[in-house]
Image: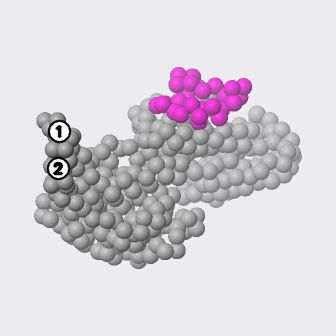
Amino acid sequence: MHKIRTYNKISPKGLSRFEAGKYTVTDNVSDPDAFILRSQKLHDEEIPPSVKAVARAGAGVNNIPIDKFTERGVVVFNTPGANANAVKELVASALLISSRDIFGGMNYVQGLTEIKDPFEMSKLLEKQKSQFAGSEISGKTLGVVGLGAIGSMVANMALELGMNVIGFDPAMSVEAAWRLSHKVKKMDSLQSLLSQADFITMHVPALDVTKHLINSEALTLMKRSAVLLNFAREEVVDSSAVKQALENNKLSKYVTDFPSPDILGREDVLLMPHIGASTSEAEENCAVMAADQLMEYLEQGNISNSVNFPKTKMPRHGGYRITFCNNNVPKVLGNVLTLLADCSLNVIDMVNKSRNEIAYNIIDVESEPTQELLEKISSVEGILSVRFL
């Protein structure tokens, strides 16, 4: 029986994936095999030694101490792309409300509470509507910074809305390239994109290299009429630099779901709570993906969408499965294979993958390994964790 500890409110659709006879799933289970969570911060949490995996039902993992888990051989999963459509639709709405004063017009109408005559109200609104005029986004150029699961969907969506789309992503994956329309023009540098775009939308993760990617220097490269959108991560945009650019008429508008006190109350800043993935569909998709990834790892040892371990999958064709992770150094795998040979265990199939400082191995053997052998494997220098499935 596998034990799953839940944090936050996880969609029942996702939790229902765990088969009742094989899993115990509660928010207070003792000695859990895995966590499934959304925004719960684990940095100060005491992590039981029984934990083998953590699944974040969402893309960002800055609420999880990844290095700490990696040192213990704990796999950390996220769910990239599961909330992509929700974010894409929010970006679409942001493009529209920033190009036309829809929000201002709605507030104006709601303030006409003293007018009781419909004809009088209609006459006044006909006279005043010009103050809420804007421009269409069709024909404008959208610059997409980051062309992953969300960025590529945003780029394709903008094309359908009649926009010209340029993109920049030095680390674009093959999968993202397949998703992206050939009509999106790839820029050689961020600077080139910023200088050409009427709208700039950020879709990069929060990393050391992306912190304040949009700063005072980057803002000087943009058109004065440009609109900046950030629905990625708070850290990628320096809000104080944005405020200064707005005050100096170096930027037209800023739209984000990462509000900060220094930019409240400005008409040229459109703020909302962090609601990019706050749809019932996105929450269900993230929970289902997180649950499926946990089950696949706990039951089969296979890994996909991990932020700290390599993608590793191997089908089962009988036998008994041993998995282990280790520091990515020479001789570890060889030492384990020697132990198997000394116990006359024949290897049916195996796979070895590495990612940065971590290596992960799946080995299927013909005979059931003894507890003594598993303990010997655990004691091999460089081994972080061993499992028998």
Q: Is residue 253 above or below residue 43?
A: below
Q: Residue at x 39, y 56 (%)?
A: 92
CA separation in Å, label 1 and label 2: 10 Å
Residue 183 position in % (x across, y down): 49, 74
Residue type, label 1 = Asp
Residue under label 1, please give it. 117
* Magenta-tinted stretch: 5-33
Tell me which secondary structure the magenta stretch mostly adopts.
loop
The image shows residue 14 at horizontal and vertical percentages of 59, 36
Q: Is residue 271 left or right of 367 when viewed as pictured?
A: left
On the image, the x and y values in percent for residue 192 come to 34, 76
Residue placed under numbered mark 2 in the picture: 123
**Total marks placed:** 2
* Residue drawn at (15%, 49%) of the image: 124
- Residue at 49% x, 48% y is 83
Determine the secondary structure under disc 2.
helix
* Between 245 and 108, the one nearer to me in the picture: 108
Q: Which quadrant does the C terminus fall into?
A: top right
Colour option used:
one colour
Is 14 magenta? The answer is: yes
Q: Is residue 299 left or right of residue 343?
A: left
Q: Nearer the viewer, residue 268 or 21?
A: 268
In the image, what residue occupies the spot 70% across and 52% down? 313
Tell me if I can see residue 190 in this picture.
Answer: no
The verdict on residue 243 being magenta is no
Three-letter amino acid code at the position of disc 2: Lys
The dot on residue 12 is none
Label 2 CA crowd tier, 10 Å (few <14, some 14–19, many 20+): few
